[in-house]
Image (cartoon, helix red, strand yellow):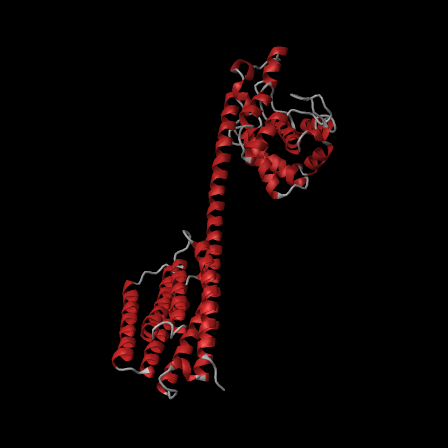
Amino acid sequence: MTIDIRSILVADSIACLVFLALSAFTWRRGHGEVPGPGYWFLGFGSLTLGLGLVAFRGPVPYSISIILGNAFLLAGVELKIVGVLRFLGLKRMRLELGMAALLAATTLCLAHFELVSPSLKARMLAISLASAAYGSIALAYLLFRSQADIRSHARVAAAFWASFSLIYLFRVGLAIEWQSGEDWLASGSVADSYSMILLMVTTAGMAVAEMLLLHGRLESTLKVTAGELLAINRELGSTQREIMLTLSEIVEFRSKETASHVARVGEYARRLSLLCGRDQAEADLIGDAAPMHDIGKISIPDNVLNKSSELDTEEMAIIQSHTIVGYRLLSKSERPLIQLAAVIALEHHERWGGGGYPAGKKGESISFAGRVVCLCDVFDALAFERPYKAPWAHERILEYILDQRGSMFEPRLVDAFLSHMDDFLRISEELNTGA
């Protein structure tokens, strides 16, 4: 059985163009984000050129085909290994210089055994030994120096480099036993023909493996970035909540109320939201936004804010304006937390049955968060001393809340609140500092 090695080489050259295109995609995808794919692309370019020079021996002078063609093939392999090192974040200048020296030495051997002492066996041996050495280097680094986040992908790439090395080790034995003449293309060696086909398959595998490596690294980078962004968002969220809580406490200090009032209202609102079936994320958002419900009081004069006697009509209008002022202060933000705080600031004095302020909304036209904070705010206001009143007894508070069920407060919220009163009393006690 005779196989046309030239036809295999032409097919290899065409296939390498496809691999070059795949490598270009890999390079473009990783450009600026991951080091290494640029070398892989150059490596495939060099392999394609080398295969073309070898495949079209005849139109291309023999000496150029043998010396330059194989030099480009070896250079392509070397570039791909440099790409592996860069991809793994390694700079091994001595190793890279050593590989360059091996390329130079092999090229000189090819020139010598083509121009001075022609020997196909010697040329095959030199090319095969150099290629096996290159493959072993890539195999070792992929197996033992790859990071944990890409290790599974690195093993796939290592498998193809192991195949590459084994094929060339096989060709070393083939070269030693070579008896098929000095014209390699015309030799029709079945064993060498199959080794070339296997090399083409292995090269295809390398192209795919490089894409997998890039995907694994980008996926890992995305996870790290997502983790970093999540941490940053958590930090920003925490800072934002602290700023909001501090501003709210400043308002409470101005009104001579306990600073922990806003913290308690927030925790009441968080708990009540959960009791009413809201998920943890929404409950946390409401709980974090609730302390800002009275931020608009920052615009109210002290003589009105802290008046101990009954307010007149004008003063009541000033007090009621804090809902609109708070909304205007907060509504300019695009942050979900502050947007919700704006809604709460506007609606926490609306009444379930209507008649509240500032818009006289009723029922479910009032936001869920607004309805929750309305109940939580009134409960805490009644339980602690204010400039205009002493703290109410627990029994009196419960009677008032029940009396306002369906009028000021949504019945469902009242039922959930009263059936878990121990939870709210515990929060009240835990956050009673400064009362």
**Residue 18 makes an appearance in the image:** yes
Above or below 336: residue 185: below
- Percent across and percent down for residue 175 are 36, 84
Identify the residue at the far front of this view.
59
Above or below 140: residue 361: above
Q: Quadrant of residue 99?
A: bottom left
Q: How many marks?
A: 0
Q: Quadrant of residue 167?
A: bottom left
Above or below 117: residue 47: above
- Percent across and percent down for residue 313 are 63, 11
**Residue 152 makes an appearance in the image:** no
- On screen, residue 365 versus residue 214, left or right, reads right
Q: Quadrant of residue 417?
A: top right
- Percent across and percent down for residue 179 are 38, 88
Above or below 134: residue 421: above
In depth, the one of 119 and 371 nearer the eye is 119
In depth, the one of 400 and 72 nearer the eye is 72
- Percent across and percent down for residue 165 are 40, 75
Identify the residue at the far left of this view.
116
In depth, the one of 195 and 236 nearer the eye is 195
